[in-house]
Amino acid sequence: MTDEQLLRYSRHILLDELGIEGQERILAGHALVVGAGGLGSPAALYLASAGVGKITLVDDDTVDFTNLQRQILHTQARVGLAKAESGRQALAAINPEIAIVPLQRRLAGDELAALVATADVVLDCTDNFATRHAINRACVQHRKPLVSGAAIRFDGQISVYDLRRADAPCYHCLFPEGEDVEEVRCAVMGVFAPLTGIVGTMQAAEALKLLAGIGESLTGRLLLLDALGMEWRNVRFRKDAGCAVCGPSGDARSGGCPDRSGADRVSSAPACRRG
Ligand SMILES: [Zn+2]
């Protein structure tokens, strides 16, 4: 670490749990942030300020005037610009010494899998089920930890799927694809501005812990926030032995999941992740 880095990250280094070794792991880390909207904004800002060595920021959209209420990566002057590039500018302004790779496209298939394979942690900050399941599949395939958040109206949720662990559930264990889940589109739904900040910031916290190798992650727990009552709920869930994505058979036998008692009540919860 250079003298400047020792200064820049001194308040991290002062933390006994983190120290120079933990900060060095963060500096050597590569975070893939999919979605540069309401959740991706605070998540990427904290990853950059905390010194994550490489951040790949993916979004196929451009900055819209209606995004500015909550998507704090972007500014009024950058309306019309690609969100990935607008985000790159914001992150570089905070920390010019990290590598930021903006990708203006919707990732899928082989390209998504190849990118996930190069990442140390993946943050799902997207806004639709198809992309979320595609990201989950790639993370299961390459055994990468996935930090997943959602925010709509006053409801937020966050969990971690640490797929480096054989016993860890995947996103599909909790929210089976094809189940009758209502897709809530953020284009037509309201979202309380700081809710996306709360959830996105927690995604950054979990990602940094995973990179540094400290603390306990949210693996096997889904945190649900009611921001109107400002109350959190903690739902535990386990790997679905019959999961069509991470189960041993890999078949489509996703009907039964004995440990989803809590999750069943939230299966139609926030679908809009970009906020
Ligand atoms: Zn699974």
Image: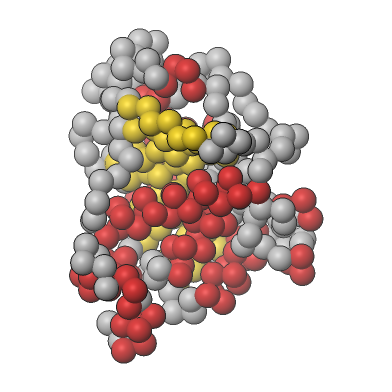
> Residue at the spot x=53%, y=38% of the render?
230
On the image, the x and y values in percent for residue 78 come to 73, 66
On the image, the x and y values in percent for residue 246 come to 31, 28
> Residue at the spot x=71%, y=38% of the render?
190
Labels in figure, total: 0
Is residue 25 among what the camera can see? yes
Residue 252: which quarter of the image? top left
On the image, the x and y values in percent for residue 25 come to 26, 66
> Residue at the spot x=24%, y=43% of the render?
164
> Residue at the spot x=72%, y=56% of the render?
68
The quarter in which the C terminus is drawn is top right
The quarter in which the N terminus is drawn is bottom left
Query: Is 111 rendered above or below residue 26?
Result: above
In-image side of 95 versus 85 (left or right): left
Residue lying farthest to the bottom in this orientation: 3
Q: Nearer the viewer, residue 259 or 128?
A: 259
Residue lying farthest to the top in this orientation: 256
